[in-house]
Image (cartoon, rainbow, N blue to C red):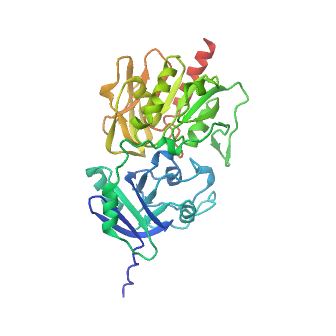
Amino acid sequence: MTAPAAKPTACLALADGTIFMGQGFGAEGEVVAELVFNTAMTGYQEIMTDPSYASQIVTFTFPHIGNTGVTEQDDEAADPVASGIVVKWDPTDPSNWRATSDLQDWMSRRGRIGIGGVDTRRLTRAIRLQGSPHVVLAHDPEGNFDIEAMIAKARGWKGLIGLDLAKEVTTRQSYHWTDGLWGWPGEFAGQDSAKPFKVVALDYGAKRNILRSLVGAGADVTVLPATATVEEVLAHAPEGVFLSNGPGDPAATGAYAVPMIRELLDRDMPIFGICLGHQMLALALGAKTVKMSHGHHGANHPVRDVDTGKVEITSMNHGFAVDAQTLPTGVRETHVSLFDGSNCGLAVEGKPVFSVQYHPEASPGPQDSAYLFKRFADAMRDRRVA
């Protein structure tokens, strides 16, 4: 005799009325967000704590989520930022020597909702065909859900267009970052004793491994809030400025970030941007950004270097893109996605200014593009010598 199916304790309601039932884990409650899918096979903790996922729920296409547990060393921010996760199989007990907790307890303590037992392949196909939907995810151990109210809330949510989320995830005050990259058997390297390059990092939602990578390239990093003025940046006498990743609509964040970046561009200072920082730089140079259908989220995205023809496998997480057709004279496209031809990098002719749409610092990887941090350091070294 077949055992009766477990009563659903979680519900995912899409704005088009589609309903997915499953088993809830993590925090109880309800959240409304945009639903995306991520194709990475590892790094679920880094994804959950990536500030770029603010106001988004992540569907993992890889079924084994939670099997290595969690450890504080892998956090990309102090707390999870993604609103919730959707997985095929319920998370199992962790089996990894570095684990300090299991995923379910970690999510419960951090107030994040998960749903397991979902046909993630069907859900991913729907996202690819119809775009990233607005959804409501609810977890109730008693299995009581007001489906109609959930659908109505998903339909009523305005979404990410026009939403400035960088102000919500940025640091509230400046701080100095000293940790370098992680190494065996589990320690973060310190700052090099050689004279470091003074770098100011604008925090639009910066991942910790970006800051570690800057230190690893020889930088002395001071992190400033997203709303920092050019006077506050220059007060630290930087030799280079870094523009970080982050969530939300770049046009909304650009309302205060773009004027400051334009003033920096007039000073011929080395500038390096990643993800939202790439979009901020593009806007400051006069280009435009557009909302993508379902965005790029994963660790297997092929990108072609226009100058060398080299193909790099990269990590990506963005729902907006720079419109390459709007890049002005004097700004060239340096990298292109081989998935859809979208812009993935730019450089300013005659200036040490460049940016990429993907994540060269990605942890756990890939690391094909880590050379970009050395390129930034070389630009600062050349300027120091000059």
66 versus 346 height, above or below: below
At x 57%, y 32%, the residue is 201
Residue 164 position, x and y percent, is 44, 41
Residue 307 in view in this figure: no
Residue 96 lies, in percent from the top left, at 60, 60
Quadrant of residue 193 in the image? top right
Residue at 42% of width from left, 26% of height from top?
284
Above or below — where is 132 with respect to 323?
A: below
The answer to which image quadrant residue 11 occupies is bottom left
> Does residue 326 lie above or below 191 as drawn?
above
Q: Position of residue 116 (x, y in %)?
A: 42, 66
In the figure, is residue 65 to the left or right of 196? left
The image position of residue 323, as x and y in percent, is 32, 31
Name the image quarter holding the N terminus: bottom left
Which residue appears farthest toward the bottom when viewing the image? Answer: 1
- Whether residue 295 is situated above or below residue 85 in the rendered picture: above
Left/right of residue 195 with respect to residue 275 in the rendered view: right
In front: 173, or 382?
A: 173
Residue 70 shows in the view: yes
Q: Nearer the viewer, residue 201 or 60?
A: 201
Q: Quadrant of the C terminus?
A: top right
Instruction: Tell me what residue is drawn at x 57 percent, y 60 percent.
Output: 69
- As drawn, the residue found furthest toward the top would be 386
Q: How many marks?
A: 0
Depth check: give the residue in front, 158 or 113.
Answer: 158
